[in-house]
Image (cartoon, rainbow, N blue to C red):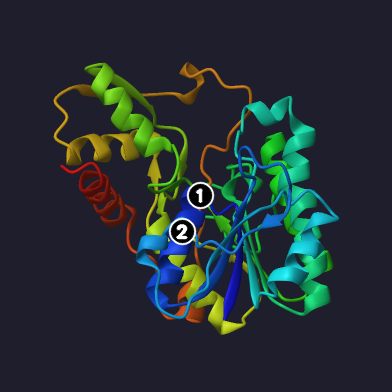
């Protein structure tokens, strides 16, 4: 099998590459590369994890902007993958309130482009959405059949992307994620660690709750789900849920921080976009499909902090 990964330089894309390496799966890693003069220039050099390259995998790095309707089919025709995993996304939630056209291009019409070619090639497409498609008023974890009602332009762009993928591709997995953390990029957990080095007093929102999820666990489940052929909509998150305050509190406890963190309302933090208060998602029927639930978010967080420690040489 050969998997075509878009947005491969992000935190989920990087761990998907590592999991493919671990399983000996061939892949083509693509992203919008800086200093690239061509939008779709595929090279034959190995991916960013070349030092760990497994025998029999011819991994390549390509530059691709998924919003380029003409570049997408060209590069897919060249690389001839057996499946596409779309990790490309516009995740600047507050900025999207003004820069909404870019958000919709990346989160809606880019996925549409991938869905069209996936259907033409008759190969599966895995696309990622978000808990931000919900308004957070239900009061209990959202099921996959609950009606979305996004509060922000970002959430609207992700929901429209879901619909376009479903319309254009019959072999699609749409996976809603929430509060993702991993080594690849900045995320809330990394921000908390940075803030803890700058001050002895922190605040955390107690009225925003969802399911923190580790990219290492997500990558494993994504590839297992791909193998089932059970296309459709899923909520892919760690077990359990937490508020921003509880996530920050647990992070600081695990690193033995000596300061104090105070629970406050989210209104104390200035933001352009409105966010759902309770957007935790129930993962049913994920376990019934792949045979297991993802680990609890506290377990995932502890392993992530250990990974940070190892990578920093601590």
Residue at the extreme front: 44
Q: Residues within 10 Å of mark 1 (few under 14, many from 20)?
A: many
Residue at coordinates 42% horizontally, 68% vertically from top-left? 19
Picture coordinates of residue 131 (x, y %)?
57, 49
Picture coordinates of residue 196 (x, y %)?
26, 25
Q: Is residue 287 left or right of residue 71?
A: left
Q: Nearer the viewer, residue 252 or 274?
A: 252
Mark 1 or mark 2, earlier in chain: 1
Q: Is residue 15 left or right of residue 166?
A: left
Q: Secondary structure at mark 2?
A: loop
- In this view of the protein, can residue 262 be seen by the observer? no
Mark 1 and 2 residues: CB-CB less than 8 Å, in contact?
yes
Residue at coordinates 46% horizontally, 55% vertically from top-left? 48
Picture coordinates of residue 230 (x, y %)?
62, 81
Q: Secondary structure at mark 1?
A: loop
Q: Nearer the viewer, residue 102 or 167?
A: 102
Q: Residues within 10 Å of mark 2 (few under 14, many from 20)?
A: many
Label 1, label 2: how many angstroms apart (C-alpha)? 7 Å
Q: Is residue 215 left or right of residue 199?
A: right
Q: Is residue 79 left or right of residue 269?
A: right
Residue at coordinates 62% horizontally, 27% vertically from top-left? 94
Q: Which mark is residue 133?
A: none
The quadrant of the image that shows the C terminus is top left
Picture coordinates of residue 279 (x, y %)?
53, 46
Task: Report which residue position mark 1 lands on.
Answer: 178
Q: Nearer the viewer, residue 77 or 121?
A: 77
The quadrant of the image that shows the N terminus is bottom right
Task: State which quadrant residue 90 falls in.
Answer: top right
Task: Report which residue position mark 2 lands on.
Answer: 237
């Amino acid at each position: 099998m050969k998997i075509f990964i878009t947005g491969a330089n992000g935190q989920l894309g990087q761990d998907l590459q590592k999991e493919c390496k671990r399983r000996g799966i061939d892949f083509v890693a693509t992203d919008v590369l800086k200093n690239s003069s061509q939008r779709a220039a595929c090279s034959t050099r190995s991916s960013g994890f070349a030092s760990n390259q497994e025998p029999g995998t011819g991994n390549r790095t390509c530059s691709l902007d998924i919003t380029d309707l003409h570049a997408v089919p060209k590069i897919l025709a060249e690389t001839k993958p057996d499946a596409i995993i779309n990790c490309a996304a516009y995740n600047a939630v507050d900025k999207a309130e003004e820069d909404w056209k870019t958000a919709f291009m990346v989160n809606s019409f880019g996925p549409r482009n991938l869905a069209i070619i996936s259907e033409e090639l008759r190969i599966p497409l895995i696309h990622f959405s978000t808990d931000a498609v919900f308004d957070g008023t239900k009061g209990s974890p959202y099921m996959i059949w609950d009606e979305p009602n996004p509060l922000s332009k970002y959430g609207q762009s992700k929901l429209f992307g879901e619909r376009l993928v479903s319309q254009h591709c019959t072999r699609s997995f749409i996976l809603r994620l929430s509060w993702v953390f991993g080594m690849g990029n900045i995320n809330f957990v990394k921000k908390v660690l940075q803030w803890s080095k700058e001050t002895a007093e922190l605040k955390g929102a107690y009225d925003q709750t969802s399911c923190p999820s580790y990219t290492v666990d997500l990558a494993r489940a994504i590839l297992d789900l791909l193998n089932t052929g059970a296309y459709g909509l899923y909520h892919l998150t760690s077990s359990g849920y937490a508020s921003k305050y509880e996530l920050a509190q647990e992070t600081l406890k695990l690193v033995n921080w000596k300061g104090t963190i105070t629970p406050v309302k989210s209104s104390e933090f200035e933001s352009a976009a409105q966010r759902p208060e309770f957007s935790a998602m129930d993962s049913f029927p994920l376990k019934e499909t792949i045979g297991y639930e993802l680990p609890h978010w506290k377990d995932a967080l502890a392993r992530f902090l250990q990974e940070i420690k190892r990578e920093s040489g601590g």
